Amino acid sequence: MLPSADQAALVEGSVSSALASVFKGKFCDLVLHNRSAVSFKRDSVLYDLGNSTRTFFFIQHGFVKVGTVTGEGREVIYDVRKDGDVVGELAACDAPRRDRAVALEDTNAIPVPFSEIIDALERSGMTAKLVDVLCDSLLEAYEQINVLTYRDVLDRLIAVLRGLATKIGRNAGDVVEIPTYLTQEDISQMVAARRERVSTALNLLRRRGIVQYSTRGHLMLRVTELQNFKA
């Protein structure tokens, strides 16, 4: 079972992912018209813990990691977002911010104040639809919490890798490539476990041929084998 601080971060992260799934598609079209993107260099912070500005960032190009730092100083990564995704969605809940977003590579994103998002939704008559989608997304998020909280490190790692393959992966022959560089520390922060334990689990998967690395250091995953893996 996860330590309480990491468990709390996982809960907040699942809610964050659920909220992000709401503000996509038609919702994006409503608020991005005639807005310009801002450029962020690799490792640049889009927003940080404690910021009080309630702004969403709609990613146009690049990859962004979203996470927090627990009271014990442990960094936890909730999610990795790509083109077409949204970060900063927890600003819909409260301020100051309890999460942070950092560019994994050079990234372009369009900032939009939360108040303007609400105005656009009200003008379009889509507020009720937003509530319906949000409720469905939150139910899925809490199901994910129940799965991840009580699994061991290897099972949690497999769940994280499968999630990355689904959210940002792209087909590369008979494997799925994660098209941005993630360090073992990044992956450990997603699994909410010590890097040494995650490294051991990754090496096991590598020996089984389930996880590989490209020449650029990108993860290459055999998703079917991940789904069927038994230690």
Image (cartoon, rainbow, N blue to C red):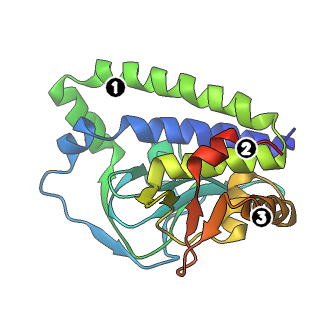
Q: Nearer the viewer, residue 53 or 25?
A: 25
The quarter holding residue 30 reads top left
In the displayed structure, 72 sits above or below 106; it is above
Q: Residues within 10 Å of mark 3 (few under 14, many from 20)?
A: few
User: Could you tell me which residue is drawn at 60 percent across and 38 percent down?
Assistant: 14
Measured as percent of width and height from the top left, residue 88 is found at 46, 51
Count of picture labels = 3
How far from the left and from the top, in percent, is residue 35?
18, 59
Q: Amino acid at mark 1?
A: Leu
Q: Which mark is residue 229?
A: 2
Residue 15 coordinates in the image, percent (x, y)? 57, 36
- The CA distance from mark 3 to mark 1 is 45 Å
Apparent side of residue 118 relative to residue 198 in the rendered image (left or right)? left
Instruction: Name the one closer to the observer, 52 or 193.
Output: 193
Closer mark to the observer between disc 2 and disc 1: 2
In this rendering, is residue 143 above or below 50? above
Label ID, residue 207: 3
Residue at horizontal 27 percent and vertical 39 percent from the top: 25
Q: Which residue sits furthest left?
A: 34
| Residue position for label 1 | 130
Q: What kind of element bears circle 1?
A: helix
